[in-house]
Image (cartoon, grey):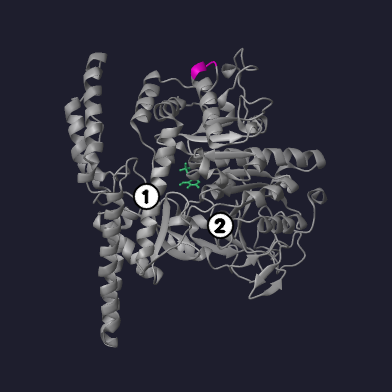
Amino acid sequence: MDVNEFRVRGKEMVDYICGYLDTLESRRVTPSVEPGYLRELLPTEAPHDPEDWDAIMADVESKIMPGVTHWQHPRFHAYFPSGNSFPSILGDMLGDAIGCIGFSWAASPACTELETIVLDWLGKAIGLPDEFLAFAQGSKGGGVIQTSASECVLVTMLAARAQAIRKQKQQHPFVEEGVLLSKLMAYCSKEAHSCVEKAAMICFVKLRILEPDEKCSLRGATIQQAMEEDEALGLIPFFVSTTLGTTSCCSFDNLREVGPVCRRFGVWLHVDGAYAGNAFICPELKPLLSGIEYADSFNTNPNKWLLVNFDCSTLWVRDKIRLTSALVVDPLYLQHGYSHAAIDYRHWGVPLSRRFRSLKLWFVIRNYGISGLQKYIRHHIRLAKRFETLVRKDKRFEVCNEVKLGLVCFRLKGTDELNQKLLSNINASGKIHMVPASVNEKYVIRFCAVVQNATEEQIDYAWDVITEFATELLDTHNLEKDQEPADEVFEMLDRKKKETLAYKRSFFVRMVSDPKIYNPKIAKTLSRSRHRHVTDTGATVDNGVSIQTPIASWISWPLAFLFQGVFDEVSSSEVPVRFRHLDTMVRLKAGREGTQSPSMSPERESKSPKRSPIMSRKTSPSKDQ
Ligand code: PLP
């Protein structure tokens, strides 16, 4: 394709995109295909000879589109929004055309400098403290664009890990880094995104997953008690990942309580606002950011809720040296004469190569203005409130989260199975698309306003679909309850069969993206621990009786998956270790000779064979020598 043909085809592509977005409503929101559908439609070999552009585009419509889930569809209400807007698409087009790889300032100065400037713009609009802004007086911080929120959490955990090991090394210069590493403990709430667990696996550190309160908010007393317990066992708290706007129900961890605890323990506090963080550009929502002054790092995804196309995940740190010193490598071929005076973003993340992503963010912010973006956020919140009102008016349903932003979690009053069936029927119909979550151990359905120009009519339509399916389901359900016992057995078997079929058929449309959030089986495993309330003093209150017990939590152990099968007995006094990726949970058992690899447990000299290696730990790192 030469420039003349590109001129023509480019314009045709813009027309195709406009037509696609304009007529999306006429398509099914989720595809009706089985796994492997495309393999049957495409050749097994790449074409040897060039193909005609028209033929390629014809295949887009006939072969690709039938397998596309339309995230920009007005009846798509799943997950969180996937940012999309014309200025953003144009910004990406230009970035692709420039095609630079901006790993250092010298590799493309505008690519680096625009990123720093736009991140300061957005950081200010969000209301981050000046310490996070690159150009604020006396600031040591700054912002960077990463590919995803998962990457933001990973790099901050890596930075915190490096900082913690450096500090320990100063105190215990003769202790091996590997031994120090085995003592490090990270923390998050059960409601945190599973990317925190993945980061802990990559960083090779233990992660303690804590129970939030009944509003799904991680509280200061809980984190304090966990850290005190762990320190008493010789472990070293080093990192806490909190969430503002959790994936399952958009709840908010209590930064004002957690922050001072992190300060006291000298622990890195990260704040993940992947979805909700964008909303803080609205002055009336800034109270939700309260406590950010305690944070060491903060991320939000404009590619979720700020009309910027994927990928654009923004991260700010209070001290850029603490981040880059964990990630810096400096071979001769990447050095340049301005290293001392300019930012080299290759030291701020995992990949070397970087796209010119700030262009699309810049285009969007300029073209909408902060006021336009605020209008968009408020519009989505208004729609969510409208949906919440509709749910509350229907006595058969209940709302299961505090609707502060654009997400409503709701369910039929009844069993989890009933709600599972409802969602499965709705999704299988292809009329609207939603995903489930587990909130306070209950199966709930998530409804999110996602499309840029979503309308009240679309929200009302979604509610009509939901109530129609609910009525049908409840009628069948009640009818089944009235049948004779013998019939019940037959019908139950029949129903089970149908459910299994429906489950299999709708497997694709349910699109499990985050096993913890969307896989009810795993959510059930998680819920086995007792739900308790922790008071300010760290005591737990159960039926009005105050008891001092270890708080409910799970440890995600970086090596756990290698040792499955090693632990064959389960004792209630032991610490539960979660193998989330294997959909199981076991309890670690220490000290039985020949059953546990010494390399797995830093507590191998534990006296009590009955207690877990973590719980029985008494020594400090220096005593390992
Ligand atoms: N954190 C939160 C709170 C999320 O909701 C999500 C995804 O929805 C993530 C992290 C992971 O985002 P990403 O896909 O950008 O890694």
Residue 296 figure quarter: top right
Relative depth, front residue between 292 and 576: 292
Please tell me which residue lies in front, 459 or 116: 459
> Closer to the N terminus: mark 2 or mark 1?
2
Determine which residue is flagged by label 2. Answer: 190
The tally of labels here is 2
Farthest front residue in view:
284
Q: Is residue 353 left or right of residue 416?
A: right
User: Horizontal placement of 420 versus 591: left or right?
Assistant: left
Q: Residue at x 57, y 36 (%)?
A: 127
Q: Is residue 273 above or below residue 219?
A: above
Mark 2 and 1 residues: CB-CB less than 8 Å, in contact? no
Secondary structure of residue under mark 1: helix
Relative height, residue 579 to residue 485 (above, below): above
The residue carrying mark 2 has its beta carbon less than 8 Å from ligand 1: no
- Where is residue 278? Give x, y as percent: 48, 40
Question: Residue at image x 80%, y 52%?
Answer: 620
Q: Residue furthest top?
A: 337
User: Toward the viewer: 71 or 350?
Assistant: 71
At label 2, the amino acid type is Lys
The residue range painted magenta reads 106-110
